Image: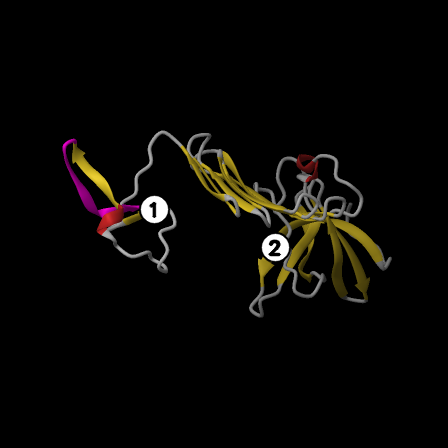
Amino acid sequence: MGMPTEQLLDTADILGTKLENHGEYSCTLGELESGKGWAKGVPAGGFSGVVSIPDPPDETGACVANFIRDGNDTLIIGTRDLRYAERLGALPAGTRGFLTRGEARVLLNPETDSIFISTVNKKADLQQAIVLDATEGQTTHLCGNTAITQTDEEITFVVNGGASLRLSKDGVFITGNVFVCCTATAHIGDMGGGTPPPNTPVNGAGMGTSPAVAASTKVFLAP
């Protein structure tokens, strides 16, 4: 792709971008193979409310601009960059998404009515993601091997394949090697009398060893 002729519609490689004083970005158009640019400060059209700045060229290629010329004026009306598309794999027709040259991405899947937001935790080299799956009615927050899943009936917390906490209308379920509760008082069971339940010594948990057992003033159990 060299210097365009007088045709109104053509393509060119984007060799660089520049942020203008009024907040708009412009591009340098040219040919990647030769490294020569022939137009600077070319504005790029797009969708209102959406900012998309082309990635810089590298050894794998460059973002290609579709532009129109009207006399001495040149305007980019669209861009195409396939350097990173293969990382997404096969997607169903109608998919919408935002992709960067890094790991951050957002995908909208029409077949499952799901929204997928993902990146990679650079410290641990593990995936971080939020998935809103309308088909299953579930929201998942993922950070490596730690996850939070939520439906309209329950919430489950799982930490790196170890301890877990599940909250549902049926109750609270805790699993793990150790359970630590550091509070001024602890009330276990339904004692009645409002929330929190009354600190009734009669319901105090037994402290000490038999026969010297005293009622706790900190831990209370339902009778």
Task: Determine whether, in the image, residue 131 is placed left or right of residue 216.
Answer: right
Secondary element at image label 2: strand
Residue visible at 61% across and 65% down in the picture: 24
Residue at the spot of label 1: 222
Return the residue found at the far right: 7
Residue visible at 76% across and 66% down in the picture: 73
Disc number placed over residue 17 in the picture, else none: 2
Secondary element at image label 1: loop
Q: Residue 219 colored magenta?
A: yes
Question: What is the crowding at mark 1: few (fewer than 14 residues within 10 Å), some, or many (at least 20)?
Answer: some
Q: Mainly helix, strand or loop, the magenta region?
A: strand
Residue visible at 80% across and 62% down in the picture: 69
**For the residues marked 2 and 1, what is the alpha-carbon distance in whole angstroms?**
69 Å
Front one among 57 and 148: 148
Judged by depth in the image, the label closer to the viewer, 2 or 1, is: 1
Return the residue found at the far bottom: 22
The C terminus lies in which quarter of the figure?
top left
Q: Quadrant of residue 83?
A: top right
Front one among 160 and 29: 160
Mark 1: amino acid? Ala
Return the residue found at the far left: 212
Residue 116 on image: x %, y %: 63, 45
Task: Determine whether, in the image, residue 219 is placed left or right of residue 97.
Answer: left
- Which residues fall within the magenta stretch? 210-223
Q: Quadrant of residue 130?
A: top right
